[in-house]
Amino acid sequence: MPRQSNLARTTTSAPNDLEAFWMPFTPNRAFKKRPRMIARAKDMHYYTPEGRAILDATAGMWCTNAGHNRDPIVAAIKDQAEELDYAPPFQFAHPKSFHLASRIAELAPGDLDHVFFTNSGSEAVDTALKMALAYWNVSGQGSRTRLIGRERGYHGVGFGGISVGGIVGNRKMFGTLLAGVDHLPATYNREHQAFTKGEPEWGAHLADELERIVALHDASTVAAVIVEPMAGSTGVLPPPKGYLKRLRAICDKHGILLIFDEVITGFGRLGTAFAAERYGVIPDMITFAKGVTSGTVPMGGVITRKHIHDAFMKGPEHVVEFAHGYTYSAHPLAVAAGIATLDVYREEELFERAKKLEPVWAEAIHGLKGEPNVLDIRTLGLVGAVDLASKPDAVGKRAYEAMEKGFHEHDITLRITGETLALTPPLTISEAQIGEVADKLRAVIRSVA
């Protein structure tokens, strides 16, 4: 009998020892009692080691916007690995990194013209925060050190990110975190916003809380405000109409930098290249990751406006202007994947496709209103969230059971946070598959009633 290749063995067989791998953001004991194994993927589906197709309603983790294992992206990664496996990003560079940076800058609005590469959204956020502090330092306003995030915000898992973030479970185990951080209130209020399609009418006034925080500390001490245009990981909270423009106006009034964390909303998720474009607001920095390579190779980054970049370009030319970076910044494989991914987005008009499908998606997901234990539904772009009522004995257990049953019994992946089921399909989803997502989700919700 011919010997099975290593590739076949690794993609079709399940491991027989699960102990060594301490899984991230996972209840390890519960998972290892009933694993949810994914062996391969193509287009809109994952496949288990046994070959069962699982409809991917979450684009992996908000990242495979172009769908899974797209041939042009896979080919670009393979070709790059054969040509150049690694190049040092400190003091040296490879040509394609400049090409990708230019492509990303072209997609960003206004004078967001300069790109600093990282390897993840978490690194992108910490980079942006350091960039903000350093900007005020080199600009002669070193007293501007205070950072302002938002309750329920998610900005990755670095110490900077969890400090400005506002998800209690991500903060409570790690001490006092960064000093000098304050938080705006969350923008969600079920009483005023329940079952909203798109941006809710209520809530723009919550941006005015920034005025109170600035008055408390004085503008001369505030470096930057960082928010997700749409709060994603906390359970999909669309911004109220006018909210982001009010934040921009208040930041301008007091000379404060505004950072949009677009790790989730970037690269078409809301029907535009970046949410900044959708909302007509130009922040001073945009963080990105996930969709830039459609999840194929880790990459992230920060896009900055011209005046921030130029503030560092002074002094002797042989001296490092910004003492920051990563061994794998602009890694050749990630850069190749990024270029190929942007080509797919452009050639298949996937951003425009997401915009066109938004009302179809909203209608399908909001069709679940009235199902057992559904307390609220929110949709924006190709994103959706369904809030479920908690079981009396265990908050979060109903959603966890929904995720388990979704995978094992209804062949669909769901993201969960608390009692929220989040949906973020690849931008390649068809109208028929949107209906399939809604039908599967309805069955899942009924199964945990």
Image: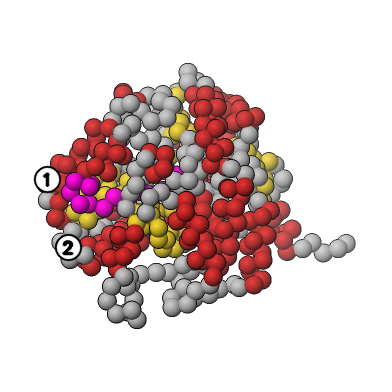
Q: In the rendered image of this protein, does residue 192 appear above or below residue 221?
A: above
Residue drawn 31% across the image and 39% down it: 244
Count of residue discs: 2
Q: Which residue is mark 2?
A: 141
Of residues 407 and 362, the one nearer the viewer is 362
For residue 184, which quarter of the picture? top left
What coloring was used for the rendering?
Answer: secondary structure
Residue 433 position, x and y percent, is 63, 32
Q: Quadrant of the N terminus?
A: bottom right
Under mark 1, the amino acid is Ala
Name the outermost residue toward the right.
1
Residue corresponding to mark 1:
215
Q: Residues within 10 Å of mark 1 (few under 14, many from 20)?
A: few
243, above or below 228, in the image: above
Q: Is residue 229 left or right of residue 401?
A: left
Location of residue 144 (image quadrant): bottom left
Q: Nearer the viewer, residue 52 or 141?
A: 141
Which x, y percent locates residue 28?
49, 50
Q: Nearer the viewer, residue 437 or 223?
A: 223
The question of residue 252 being in magenta is answered with yes
At horizontal 71% and vertical 53% (from top left) the residue drawn is: 12
- Residue 222: x and y in percent read 19, 54
Residue 399 badge: none
Q: Is residue 2 magenta?
A: no
Closer to the chain start, of discs 2 and 1, is 2
